[in-house]
Amino acid sequence: MAADSASGLEAAKGASKDSSSTGLPILQAQALGMRFAAPEGQISLFENLDFSINAGDSLAILGTSGSGKSTLLGLLAGLDLPSTGTVVMDSHDLNTLNEDERAVLRAGRVGFVFQAFHLLPGLTALENVMLPAELAGDSAARNKAAEALGRVGLSDRLLHYPAQLSGGEQQRVALARAFISEPQILFADEPTGNLDHKTGDQIIDLLFALNRDHNTTLIVVTHDQAVASRCARVRYLRNGVLTAEAG
Ligand SMILES: Nc1ncnc2c1ncn2[C@@H]1O[C@H](COP(=O)(O)OP(=O)(O)O)[C@@H](O)[C@H]1O
Ligand SMILES: [Mg+2]
């Protein structure tokens, strides 16, 4: 097992970023099942969910509250493992990697904007954004973080702590943190949910600029039709299945 883990880690580190320009699937899931033990009994969110997205594509996922959108995003990003089924990211079967190996795989490929932001309260906006780049050993982390915060309109909030920022500003810090390392795949869970229209539009413009200019694959959970309409594909999560049909 140790040998397998070590080779998994090497594979995760060593893989090239080739798939960004090929238009081949960068992320696939097969027969995903996800169950939770809950006080009321077992909750089954998906039994047999299939998914595929090509590098550089953009996808909106819609669905009612509680349909499992955030859970699905976490599985596709390799933050959690499914109860059954497989997720293959950039040719790596996540089931064959342990937690550390999945973190290494994600570090070079995945940006994630959480619905609840998940900013570290003891770090300033600048420190929150520079953390992933710093952990990756990037000596330009501070400058890149300042630039990323500028792109989301927060140049005058660099030294604020999360508690000193509005919900919309925290959302923008979380977005800057997600794209600072130029991920191949950017997951965003309701990225405009806390923003007014104007700020929301700016954030969406930024997401699609990343998609266009860096070929960043976008997977966005949203209730916002304006966001969905700008994605190349829209899917609805209903009764544990992704479908192309609304309602
Ligand atoms: N760790 C967990 N344990 C138990 N139930 C969970 C867990 N995570 C999510 N759920 C349940 O799964 C359902 C879907 O949650 P979620 O993925 O957050 O939905 P959505 O993002 O579509 O609103 C909810 O009913 C939620 O309570
Ligand atoms: Mg959610």
Image: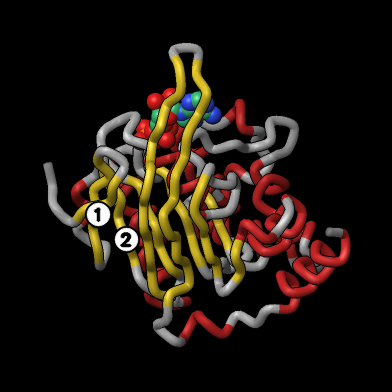
Q: Residue at x 44, y 44 (%)?
A: 33
- Asked which secondary structure carries label 2, the reply is strand
Task: Say above or below: 143 vs 228.
Answer: below
The color scheme shown is secondary structure
**Numbered disc in front, either 2 or 1:** 1
> In front here: 70 or 158?
70
Could you say which quadrant of the image residue 181 lies in? bottom right
Instruction: Check the picture and name the quadrant holding the C terminus.
Output: top left
Toward the top, the furthest residue is 39
Q: Residue at x 55, y 32 (%)?
A: 165
Q: Amino acid at mark 1?
A: Arg
Please tell me in which quarter of the rendered image ligand 1 is found.
top left
Could you say which quadrant of the image residue 189 lies in? top left
Depth order, front residue of 170/77: 77
Q: Is residue 97 above or below residue 57?
A: above
Can the viewer see residue 90 in this picture?
Answer: yes
Q: Amino acid at mark 2?
A: Leu
Q: Which residue occupies 60% across, 28% down?
A: 164
Left or right of 125, for residue 63: left
x and y, in percent, of residue 205 in the image = 34, 61
Residue under numbered circle 2: 59
| Residue 14 screen position, x and y as percent | 74, 78
Q: Which mark is residue 235?
A: 1
User: Where does residue 52 sit, x and y in percent of width and height?
Assistant: 38, 66
Few, some or many C-alpha atoms within 10 Å of disc 2 (few <14, some 14-19, many ≥20)? many
Secondary structure under the numbered disc 1 in the rendered image: strand
Is 233 in front, or is 147? 233
What mark, if any, has residue 49 been given in the picture?
A: none
* Quadrant placement of the N terminus: bottom right
Q: Position of residue 104 (x, y in %)?
A: 73, 61
Q: Is mark 1 within 8 Å of ligand 1?
A: no
